[in-house]
């Protein structure tokens, strides 16, 4: 499986987003992770489609947009038009899961389904035929900088066993050590916020995450 690192801009310097994106681009990040929160699905509010559109105009790395919002279906077109390449939404949201996946694909994006820590991985199985990626949360969604939940690994192991070619993403508390645990379980797409942007050298941290994920 291809290893992909997706730095989460949530932990970046919001006063210098273009420079922060360039750091990721120059360091060879495969994706850029953008966390959208509505203050309803999660108790925090972040950015929306207009900001993502502006960022897209200065960055050539594909955008991995993680919607933590109650009604994703209503906003798929906006995020697709803003330049999202992958759109993840939560199976626990209020929107119809199949309709939302179909809408993402109809808008020309790749669809991903995210599961919160308390959601059984079985919940994604009926939708696997149309999904490009499954996002297994390794913290409760809502905030950066939380501790990694190692007890999510059985979900990843099971999904990897059943889907050898699926992109399996982990998000929350990923650093140079926990990336190894997730890779060993079968994850291949790694979101990292604090680990990258609170590091003295984000570019070096991105390559370290990659090496550790590959086990070299
Ligand atoms: C949390 C977000 C994450 C967050 C991860 O709800 O989905 O993407 O930015 O941050 P770290 O890597 O600091 O745990
Ligand atoms: Zn995220």
Image (spheres, rainbow, N blue to C red):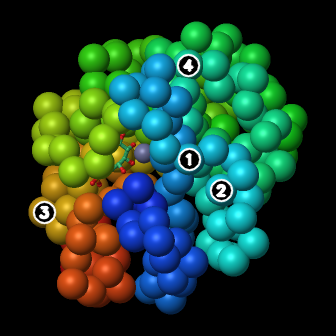
Instruction: Tell me the crowding category of disc 2: few under 14, some 14 to 19, or many 20 or more residues within 10 angstroms, Cα based.
Output: few
Measured Cα–Cα span from mark 4 to mark 1: 15 Å
Image location of residue 68, percent across then percent down = 50, 32
Is residue 59 placed above or below 145 in the rendered structure?
below
- How many angstroms separate mark 3 from mark 1 (CA)? 29 Å
Task: Identify the residue at horizontal 56%, vertical 19% (top origin).
Answer: 70
Give the residue pinned by disc 4: 70
- In this figure, which residue is indicated by the disc labeled 2? 51
- The crowd level at tag 1 (other Cα within 10 Å; few <14, some 14-19, many 20+) is few
Q: CA distance from mark 2 to mark 3?
A: 32 Å
The residue at which mark 3 appears reads as: 177
Label of residue 47 in the image: 1
Residue 158 pos. (x, y %): 32, 30
Query: Which mark is on residue 95?
Result: none
> Which of these two is toward me, 86 or 193?
193
Q: Is residue 85 visible?
A: no
């Amino acid at each position: 499986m291809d290893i992909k690192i997706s730095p989460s801009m949530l932990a970046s310097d919001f006063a210098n987003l273009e420079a922060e994106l360039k750091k990721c681009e120059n360091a060879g990040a495969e994706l850029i992770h953008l966390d959208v929160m509505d203050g309803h699905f999660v108790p925090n509010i972040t950015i929306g489609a207009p900001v993502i559109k502006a960022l897209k105009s200065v960055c050539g790395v594909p955008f991995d947009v993680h919607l933590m919002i109650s009604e994703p279906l209503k906003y798929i077109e906006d995020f697709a038009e803003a330049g999202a390449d992958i759109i993840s939404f939560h199976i626990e949201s209020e929107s119809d899961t199949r309709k939302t996946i179909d809408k993402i694909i109809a808008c020309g994006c790749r669809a991903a389904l995210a599961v919160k820590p308390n959601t059984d991985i079985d919940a994604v199985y009926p939708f696997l035929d149309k999904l490009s990626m499954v996002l297994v949360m390794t913290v409760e969604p809502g905030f950066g900088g939380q501790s990694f939940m190692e007890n999510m690994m059985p979900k990843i192991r099971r999904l990897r066993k059943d889907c050898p070619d699926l992109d399996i993403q982990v998000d929350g508390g990923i650093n140079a050590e926990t990336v190894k645990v997730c890779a060993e379980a079968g994850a291949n797409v790694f979101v990292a916020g604090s680990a990258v942007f609170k590091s003295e050298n984000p570019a070096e941290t991105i390559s370290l995450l990659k090496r550790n994920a590959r086990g070299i």
